Amino acid sequence: MKALTFYDVQDLRYEEVADPAIEKDDDVIVKVKAVGICGSDIARYRNLGPYVKGNVWGHEFSGEVVQTGPAVTELKAGDRVVGCPNLVCHECRYCKSGHPSRCESLNTIGAYVPGAFAEYIKMPAVNLVKMAESMTYEQGALVEPATVAIHGLYQTNIKMGYEVAVVGCGNIGLMAIRWAKAFGAKKVFAIDIDDAQLEIARKFGADVLINSTNIDFHDEIRKYGNGVDLAIESAGNPFTAARVLGLPKKGGEVVYMGIPYADVPVPRFYFERIMRNELTIIGSWCTISAPYPGEEWNNAVEYIGNKKVDVLGMVTHKVNLSKGPEMFEEIIADPKSFGKVLLYPEEIM
């Protein structure tokens, strides 16, 4: 089959690789229909390189079941599915206590095992969730980034009437805005340095837009009151990772959904907000909970499938998988021109 294989920084190749095959009784082979490029993919392509040289990459996908192992009873050929990319042992103390996102052997497709930038992928049956009948494969490929936001919100005490600030309006930030509204947030502040991205955030439900290019967003938030109930850091930027601590009101929460790929220096003023305001600081990792893969996945499929939550507004480009190497180069050359990019193993143009 054809796939995108990741060899080194800015070395992504479209080439022939071996087809996946059933090896375990619970294995399922899925024909990939649509697969998204994640922000973490861009960071690895531009700066970090692969976990395993030459591995098939990618983890946000939807597809059709084509073959199942002998122990698989819940799925059959022809089923339309989305894939949870997080692989866990189901045996360690964290998995057994209902916290699979903390699994001692946590892995992800596209990291140390073959991923979804390919015509076919092999997955454990438990990692596949049936799509709603009304869902398109494009919507299915956006379920995984939706679950990142949902999982993060599940770690918090968000409830009806909350005021929420989202720092960083990339794909995860947009999902956080959309799902904060679905969770009942009364007012959502969207903070970014890109006016075009802020306008998309408005369409995703943001009530107040703050361009923080030339202003301190901490001071700007204070014009609307004493701070927010919940601040979400989704930019993955060292600067914002520190300053987000100034946004919550006393007794408020901060949840980190973005990954900063550099050290995070925290000025004294912002560090002191943790203590003086008795903040709750929360880290959020992966997309999974118990019963595995978790309500994140069921809720995302239900809400997206029933059109209670629109996710397609973030998609800016749809291209053939064969154009993947060129697309990554275009994204790092002009990142502001790209939202969510979907790749298609089957030729679409």
Image (tube, helix red, strand yellow):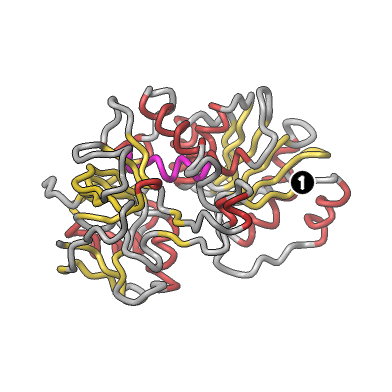
Q: Residue at x 35, y 47 (%)?
A: 125
**Residue at the disc numbered 1:** 280
The image shows residue 84 at horizontal and vertical percentages of 41, 48
The image shows residue 327 at horizontal and vertical percentages of 26, 59
The answer to which of 253 and 207 lies nearer the viewer is 253
The image shows residue 316 at horizontal and vertical percentages of 31, 43
The answer to which of 244 and 144 lies nearer the viewer is 144
Q: Over which residues does the magenta segment extend? A: 140-149
Q: Is residue 142 magenta?
A: yes
Number of callouts: 1
Q: Would you place residue 107 above or below residue 169 in this image?
A: below
The image shows residue 135 at horizontal and vertical percentages of 30, 30
Q: Would you place residue 328 above or below residue 211 in this image?
A: below
Residue 226's image quarter? top right
Mark 1, secondary structure of its residue:
strand
Q: Residue at x 60, y 24 (%)?
A: 184
